Image: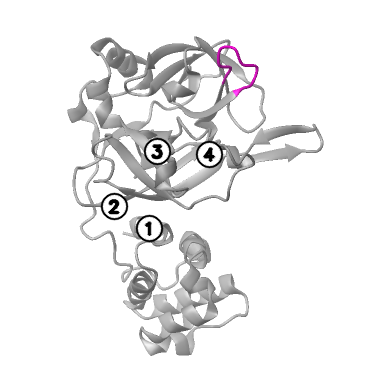
Amino acid sequence: MAGLIPERVAEVLAVPSGSGAWRHGSGYRVGDRWVLTAAHVVGQQRETVVRFGADRVGQGARVALHSDKADLALLELAGRLVPESGGPPFYGAVPETDATLPFTTVGFPLFKTSWDPGTRTYYRDPCHASGVISVLSNRREGTLELAVSPPHAGPDPHRSPWEGMSGAAVWHDGALIGLVSAHHLNDGLGRLAAVRVDRWYELLTSTELALMHQYAGLPATPAELTGIAAPPDGTVSLANLPENLPLRELDGLVTALTALPSVSDRNGLALILDSIDPVISAMSPRSPALRPDVFGILRTCLRYRGTLDQLLEAIRLVEGDSVGVARMDQEAVELSRRHR
């Protein structure tokens, strides 16, 4: 079973010894009864609570595997469960090359805390974060550096707004490649760290690896992990897209583009259009609303072969390296794959 499945995203709750307050974390269900999370989320507790969806009824779970060294825990859900179709996720190994890779993850950080006036309770909504992995960062620590859009300060100025994101599964191209493990304050609000799946083979004991293989579907050896190839230049060509592409197919790319400062600013967008084939700015149907305007620009580009690639390259030059540009490129890659 490939890719992130929203119904499998878990919120993990534990009560540290001597405390009456819940410790929040994130996790991911990898089988009928099994959930992966970070070891520090459950601490020394042997039992915890897992729930799938914000403010849902929780299920009891026992800690079947706990590795401080790998910051990894495997939880077994208690009680009667509805068997899930499909199998465990694909697990992937990140290449040790000069590359940046897009990623996605879903968890329950502190800054997503909300108040429900109906039940008069606080709850955490999930956060769907995406960005880029700088593969060669954090080599001494042995983690993945995840560049994300930084949140505003959380509800408690003395706590990281990312608190509770630990244990969230990190995905690239349909493969689970790590679990969020930390937010290093010195890195700022736009960086997270994740333990790499391929390092589990170094950090777990043979008994722990056997448990992960049996219950979580982890391949028995690192050689069996899904290989992830570094993109040659991080971009793809969209020159061969059909010119009558339905609007829904462009939705993801339009969403990524309208989130970029240079596109959302009218002067910036005019600068970009002036730098490519003039037929695009001359013939694009213009709208006072940004999103319909960008849809119109893309539809015009589709009628003139190669101009969509020109548009994206101009945006890269204006924006530089950023999380937003990485998201744009990710949407372009997925669009290209759907129409090979």
Q: Helix, strand or loop at disc 1?
A: helix
What residue is disc 1 on?
326
Near-viewer residue (276 or 217): 276
What span is colored magenta in the figure? Answer: 14-22
Q: Position of residue 84 (x, y in %)?
A: 49, 24
Could you tell me how many numbered marks the image carries? 4
Q: Secondary structure at mark 3?
A: strand
Give percent across and percent down for residue 231.
24, 54
Compared across the picture, whether 170 is left or right of 223 comes to right
Quick one: quadrant of the N terminus? top left
Q: Which residue is mark 2?
A: 100
Q: Please report contact status of discs 2 and 1: CB closer than 8 Å, yes or no.
A: yes
What kind of residue is marked 1? Ala
Residue denoted by label 3: 170
Q: Which residue in the protein does label 4 denote?
A: 160
Local crowd size for mark 2, using a 10 Å CA cut-off: few (<14), some (14–19), many (≥20): some
